[in-house]
Image (cartoon, rainbow, N blue to C red):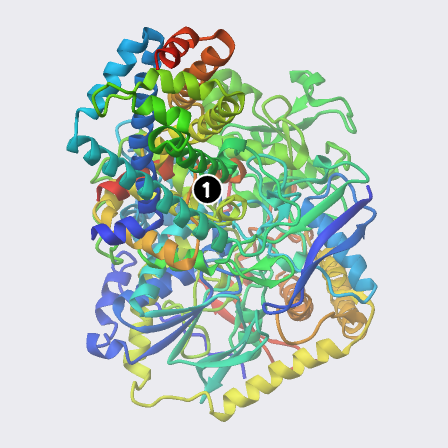
Amino acid sequence: MAYQLDAKIPAGPIQEKWTNHRFNLKLVNPANKRKFKIIVVGSGLAGGAAAASLGELGYNVECFCYQDSPRRAHSIAAQGGINAAKNYPNDGDSIWRLFYDTVKGGDYRAREANVYRLAEVSNNIIDQCVAQGVPFAREYGGLLDNRSFGGAQVSRTFYARGQTGQQLLLGAYQSLSRQIARGTVKMFPRSEMLDLVLVDGHARGIIVRDLVTGEIRRHAADAVILATGGYGNVFYLSTNAMGCNVTAAYRAYRRGAGFANPCFTQIHPTCIPVSSDHQSKLTLMSESLRNDGRVWVPKKKGDKRPPNEIPEDERDYYLERRYPSFGNLVPRDVASRAAKERCDAGHGVGATGLAVYLDFSDAIQRLGRDVIEARYGNLFQMYEKITAEDPYQVPMRIYPAVHYTMGGLWVDYNLQSTIPGLFVGGEANFSDHGANRLGASALMQGLADGYFVLPYTLGDYLAREADMNVKVGTDHEAFAAAEREVRDKIERLMAVGGKEPVESFHKRLGRLMWDYCGMARNAEGLQKALAEIPKLREEFWAEVRVTGGPDGLNAELEKAGRVADFLEFAELMCRDALHREESCGGHFREEHQTEEGEAKRDDENFSYVAVWEFKGDGEEPELSKEPLTFEHVPLTTRSYK
Amino acid sequence: MELTLHVWRQAGPDQPGRMEIIRATGISEDMSFLEMLDKVNDDLIRDGVEPIHFDHDCREGICGTCSLMINGIAHGPEEGTTTCQLHMRSFQDGDSIYIEPWRSRAFPVIKDLVVDRSAFDRIMQAGGYVSINVGAAPDANSIPVPKEDADLAFDAAACIGCGACVASCPNGSAMLFVSAKIGHLAHLPQGRVEHERRLRAMVAQMDKEGFGPCSNHFECEAVCPKEISARFIGEMNRDFIRC
Amino acid sequence: MSLTSKLTSSIGAKAVMAVSGVLLMLFVLGHMLGNLQIFLGPEQLNSYAAHLQGLGPLLWLIRLFLLAVLAAHVLAAIKVWRDSAAARPIPYSHPGSVQTTFAARTMLLSGALVLAFLIWHLVHFTVVNDPALAALKHPEGAEPHHPDVYAMVVAGFSHGGVSLLYILAQILLGLHLSHGAASLFQTLGLRRTGKAPSRVDLFAKAFAGLIVVGNCSIPIAVLLFGLGEDYLFSVLHAQ
């Protein structure tokens, strides 16, 4: 039976939906809040903010993260900034414009009502963060500074040098620490969720492995929030942290949560190119660099001259040429594809030919080295450390890399998944970015979900559907069964006794996904991937070697569990990519492009959210569709020319 | 490159540990230090030996998870660099490299090079925040903050909580971490309100965790991957004595 | 915050060390300036000594105060040392450092040796158990509490061994001061730069150098340049 997808979008004009909805949401009596227990998995911007806010409200919260401290969640690595519709620069920004840009930037595959709410609460986020002591960049007058970012023609991005994510996460972490001290939140670091527990169809708990002792533990609650981030590491090489994984979301999917648009992945245009096989991760260079850097390749194919020896008229500033009005600030998907197109055409630079130049010499000449250093000093330093080249002297070499996943667990307007009582926030859900996320919007969405949406909508669920006096204990059969499955999987992994390290399988899967489900996809390649992935999975279960034992800290066992889930999830991604016979945002199907090589959407047939339902191992997942309607942002071909 | 690694191996929290010699072969100078360990681990696993456990996550120098005393220097020989951003081009073919975990009573070893740094979290829980609830904030521009103050606050807030300051301090002191946390909020009007209360609580927790006192060696500042200045220690001392 | 919990905190202990250190520095400076009067001749030094003796009960108060300051300095040092040792139960097998100094790493040792020297020094010149010096401390015919300090100093430093010990102790004190006199500014929150060069470092080095040169000039003058040789001869012969 397919899902009956009800997005629960409130009635009324879009500007009033959230206000009205908040009034209509049921409330939990303050005295009763502490009787409700809520599990939050993940401690990044969405999870950390949700756990802190729910703790402030008086709920009894348990928060879990696999890192050794909630302060290390990967939100910390976001560099560029966070958007808000404050219109402080007086350049014509508004909530409506942020809403409009985000829907358009997402290539019309996001839900309008959610995006409007996101734009609406964006201003509260900035207020909240400043009050927490986030040291945003300021002007000499003492007021907040803004910068421009890809996909927008206004300056609405607030930033803290190149470490905005870090500062925002520390703000959330500080609020979380305060609640931990007050006893409203109990923190479980170095704990990995390995399964979701359902009782009578409702999410009532999780099974967790204590990564230090190896102990498998049951945790029961009245509701569960997943804020476990994205699945970009399915590609092995990505800008995600090494530990980022799909396990929590994938396990929820196997328990019945619909997975929406898994093929929507964002390839970030400005990363340091891959240098060789030993590479374990890719490093992003903030998109903000495109404010002052100019992207170019040599006009001549295979031109091996050093960049500084190539005269101006032999350089092709291809973004400025193709997209005169947005120039170097086109959205990420457009910039990434344009780089790939130039490299595929033989104009790529560097040893591998898979790189383009990002050149600051004009900006340094115009503004002076000091200004550039103040804006991007830490990024330039990082680049130099990794490549041993000085970007003040030689143009940076950049190439696109997997960065963010717009797809995720399907949620309704209340951020509730198809499983009652299971809420999903941040990158783990699919909700706000459509097929392409604009720069500086991930931080906005994570904090919006955590601080301003989940605390309301979760209360409504508890008031309506949960009974504080009826508690499900961890001795319930459903917990025992889930724990058995978890233990069984661990035992099977330990028992394979092959010879090949986990990492090696992960690399092979990543290569496969990058080749066939990466920046550009086609039916033939996807079918090939769909044939190869099960073989690789079989080989994994026959040949993998997991050293050590199930007790105590065992990094290999952790990785093995995650890679096992990636090996299943990858298939779902390819299936989704194959079924979506159009190009939109980060999903570029080579069969569907304009003559100029731009993405060609098919609004008539694909203006929907694809929601996949798990049907059992070896069974094909079932597709359900949530139709998308665009009443406020007219469907047009996205043009940045 | 080929290297001789002297690595601390310890099976578990209460197990005895010792330095072991492990050969690293087929190392390229473009590898990061952790990628070098990945390669060594790959070889170990193929030989059926349990790999070297070490903490790491973002591998771009911002999460603060990676650690390692490398030849007696926290995060290795490059200034202002985390271990994950340290590259093998900083070493010579044939080098011997000593790799040890952070050593501090407050950071007990969990396994091999992995230590428990939750003491830092407990110090933060003692008061490292501004006591405001979500929803109560005034407009972000209602309180102007001089740019110099905001910049200084940022300099302190750049701390990634890796613990290199503690590991490198001859006294095992956490003063740079604590003073960075306090300095971040002390330089902003929003954090000023409960500054003294925060200061007293965090210093008390720092002492309780078993970190050593500061003797002004300035080793912490020298190894800090975010180059946080020990001036924040001075400011914290001054405010503590006055309050 | 209560004074006791403040003083027993790690920062408090360091503040005690710094404040007592400042007082001890003032004493060391004053003591040196007093002693340097030896270059102005026996009358000057002896009348200065007599003036100090003449303070009577006040002198004892000052002595008790200095003793208390010294005790506080030593107790704080013991606390810092014990807490530091406890903070790192397992040492590194391959220790390294980037920018700490020899002086900073040897504060405990230099401090303990200076303390040992101080005790010997008190016994040597103040308690006096050397009969030759005792004779000079209580010269015949002089009023009580008017020792011939000038002659005592010259007699004392006429021994090569004594002078050498004295000079070594001054070098250790200088080493101790070269870190301590700078460190106290950071501990009291008066340094604004972190490790980056500060006038504070210059001050500490100058102060330490001044003390070493000033104090060592006396034994060197006596031993190598015959300062007061004639005077001592005449005093001894007058007896």
- The residue at the point 37 percent across, 33 percent down is C122
Hey, which quadrant is residue A464 in on the image? bottom left
Q: Nearer the viewer, residue A581 or A56?
A: A56
Judged left or right of residue A443, residue A451 is: left
Q: Position of residue A454 (x, y in %)?
A: 35, 66
Callout 1 secondary element: loop
Q: Say which residue label 1 marks.
A: A163
Pick whichever, C232 or A514, lies toward us.
C232
Query: Crowding at label 1, few (<14), some or many (≥20) Cα neighbours within 10 Å?
Result: many
Q: Is residue B167 above or below residue A317?
A: below
* Figure quadrant of residue B156: top left
Quadrant containing the N terminus of chain A in the rendered view: bottom right
Q: Is residue C152 left or right of residue C46?
A: right
User: Which corner quadrant of the image does residue A116 belong to?
Assistant: bottom left
- The residue lying at 58 percent from left, 23 percent from top is A392
Question: In the image, what residue type sits under mark 1?
Answer: Gln
Disc tally is: 1
Residue B236 seen from this side: no
**Tag 1 subunit:** A
x then y, percent, for residue A72 = 49, 55
> Which residue sits at x=49%, y=52%?
C85
